[in-house]
Image: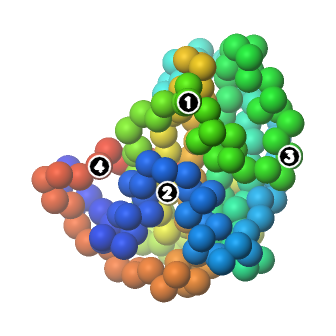
Amino acid sequence: MPNQTLPNAQWYDWLMDPSSLTRRLQQASNGHFQVELLNQAIVKPALNEAALLGLHSQAYALVRQVCLRGHDQPWVFARTVIPLSTLAAGNRYLLKLGNRSLGSVLFRHAHTHRAPIEITYDRRRQEGFQATSIGATLPHFWWGRRSVFQIKHAPLLVSEFFLDDFQRSLALPTETPLASNHSPSLFVAQ
């Protein structure tokens, strides 16, 4: 894709790392890390989320939204979509995570597999749009990533969006280089 926005090396390291984001955030915050549950409900996921999970457009799923906080600042907005069939396949404990991170569970299971990571850039920055709070459907972010996990052969989708306080705290660059021929898969955040 010509003129596609891609991350520089520092952002790329965070976005494409297949290990636990929770563990990396705990390290980056020197242990001053917490998970804040914003919302959890059984609803219809976005159409692009349903399609990735192989769900019918009218299907319901458990949608969990959390804020991952470092040094008491909102660093990452995370949204997980868990099909009801995944919960029924021996994963009902996912209903009871509360303020625990999903990563603390996913990366402990030997039966967890991750599909390739897709990334996105907040195009609203280029259009002058500013979301004002974490409570918004999708807050203002720099970069985001998502991937489908298989846990006991049942899918769930995890999307993570890196917020302004994360960028400032880690002094990550704000410029947006253009694409190369070896770019990761991109998606449009909605």
Q: Secondary structure at mark 4?
A: loop
* Mark whose residue sits in front, 4 or 3: 3
Alpha carbon distance from label 4 to label 1: 26 Å
In this rendering, which labeled residue sits more in front, label 1 or label 3?
1
Kind of residue at badge 4: Pro
Q: Which mark is residue 20?
A: none
Q: Earlier in the sequence, mark 1 or mark 3?
A: 3
Q: Which mark is residue 184?
A: 4
The residue to which callout 2 is attached is 144
Q: Earlier in the sequence, mark 4 or mark 1?
A: 1
- The furthest residue to the left: 181
Which residue is at a point 86% across and 36% down the rendered structure image? 96
Numbered disc 1: secondary structure: loop
The three-letter amino acid code for the residue at tag 2 is: Gly
Which circle marks residue 110 in the picture?
1
Q: Quadrant of residue 115?
A: top left
Residue at point 35%, 79% (across, down): 175
The residue shown at (70%, 62%) is 68
Q: CA distance from mark 2 to mark 4?
A: 12 Å
> Is there CB contact under 8 Å for labels 4 and 1?
no
Up-down relation of residue 116 to residue 15 (above or below) = above
Q: Residues within 10 Å of mark 3 (few under 14, many from 20)?
A: some
Q: Are marks 4 and 3 in contact (CB under 8 Å)?
A: no
Q: CA distance from mark 1 to mark 2?
A: 26 Å
Camera-side mark, 3 or 2: 3
- Residue 168 percent location from the top left of the image: 55, 84
| Comes first in the chain, label 4 or label 3 | 3
Q: Say which element carries label 2.
A: strand
Q: Which residue is mark 3?
A: 98
Q: Earlier in the sequence, mark 1 or mark 2?
A: 1
